[in-house]
């Protein structure tokens, strides 16, 4: 109910939990979806990605020297 | 033109979201991490094509999504591996008190067609608008809406959320486990 009121009051479709999708906090599917996704987002990030970006950055700098 | 420090920072910050989306799409953590790696490399290579001030997250998600489908085409869309097949066969019956196992939910999500899964993830989990999701998926807004709707219905069916219905393959043990007195 609250989400619906907030959405209407805001005048714009809210980004999350829009009532018309039935994916909002009142919907079990919506809640489980977010829980599933949030677990993934908060998962520990392996080092390889930060290392990759550093490598890419380093490669750029090296190219400049050539 | 070199990549700015700010852009590199933004890429770093986006990694958790990218990983979440990649896992949702591929349903495989190893493949997902490879996808994220490819995405970061591509994003770096074409950083000049990104317009500052526009939605970086959507831009990155688009790259990742395109990479996912491109790899699938190259592989000739491999059939579900044996784990996937086993998952599909597992009886996904409602837990006793109306609370879903995340494991069950993940299994159900995996069984959705790719286009429905990605649509419901983008709208219901990643927080994009219909317009953004349509751009990422390169389709009409109406198409996204119908995919989300079908995905939701299908998930409800698989997870038997709406009510008591015939249970999965192991009907006998389920009847024993589920007590009407609850």
Image (cartoon, helix red, strand yellow):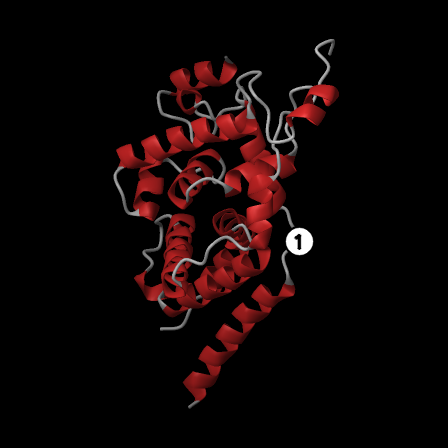
- Residue drawn where x is 45% and y is 16% of the image: A4
Q: Residue furthest front?
A: B172
Q: Residue furthest left?
A: B140
Q: Position of residue B154 (x, y in %)?
A: 45, 30
Instruction: Decide if residue B64 is on the left or right side of residue B182.
Output: left
Residue A49, above or below B28: below
Mark 1, Cα crowd under 10 Å, few <14 / some 14-19 / many 20+, is few
- Residue drawn where x is 64% and y is 61% of the image: A46
Q: Position of residue B94 (x, y in %)?
A: 63, 25
Residue B95 at least partly seen: no
Q: In what element is the residue under mark 1?
A: loop
Q: Residue furthest top?
A: B181
For disc 1, the chain is: A
Give the mark count: 1
Q: Position of residue B177 (x, y in %)?
A: 74, 22
- Residue drawn where x is 40% and y is 72% of the image: B2
Q: Pick the residue in front: B106 or B81.
A: B81
- Residue drawn where x is 43% and y is 84% of the image: A63
Residue tagged 1: A44
Residue B160, above or below B54: above
Q: Position of residue A17 (x, y in %)?
A: 48, 26
Residue B17, above or below B38: above
Q: Quadrant of the C terminus of chain A?
A: bottom left
Instruction: Decide if residue B177 is on the left or right side of residue B134.
Output: right
Q: Residue furthest bottom?
A: A66
Residue B125 at least partly seen: yes
Residue B178, above or below B52: above
């Amino acid at each position: 109910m609250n989400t619906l009121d907030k959405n209407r009051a805001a005048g714009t479709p809210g980004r999350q939990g829009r009532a018309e999708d039935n994916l909002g906090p009142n919907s079990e599917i919506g809640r489980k979806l977010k829980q599933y996704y949030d677990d993934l987002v908060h998962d520990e990030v392996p080092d390889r990605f930060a290392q990759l970006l550093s490598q890419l950055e380093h490669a750029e700098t090296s190219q400049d020297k050539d | 033109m070199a990549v700015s420090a700010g852009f590199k920072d933004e890429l770093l910050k986006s990694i958790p979201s990218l990983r979440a989306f990649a896992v949702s799409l591929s349903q495989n953590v190893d493949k997902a991490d490879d996808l994220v790696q490819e995405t970061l490399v591509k994003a770096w290579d074409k950083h000049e094509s990104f317009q500052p001030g526009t939605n970086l997250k959507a831009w990155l998600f688009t790259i990742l999504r395109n990479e996912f489908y491109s790899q699938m085409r190259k592989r000739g869309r491999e059939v579900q591996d044996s784990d996937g097949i086993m998952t599909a066969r597992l009886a996904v019956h409602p837990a006793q008190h109306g609370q879903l196992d995340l494991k069950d939910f993940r299994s159900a999500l995996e069984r959705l067609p790719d286009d429905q899964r990605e649509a419901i993830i983008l709208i219901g989990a990643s927080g994009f608008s219909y317009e953004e999701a349509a751009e990422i998926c390169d389709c009409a807004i109406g198409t996204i809406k119908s995919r989300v709707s079908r995905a939701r219905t299908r998930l409800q069916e698989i997870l038997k959320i709406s009510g008591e219905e015939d249970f999965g393959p192991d009907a006998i043990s389920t009847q024993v486990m589920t007590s009407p007195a609850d």
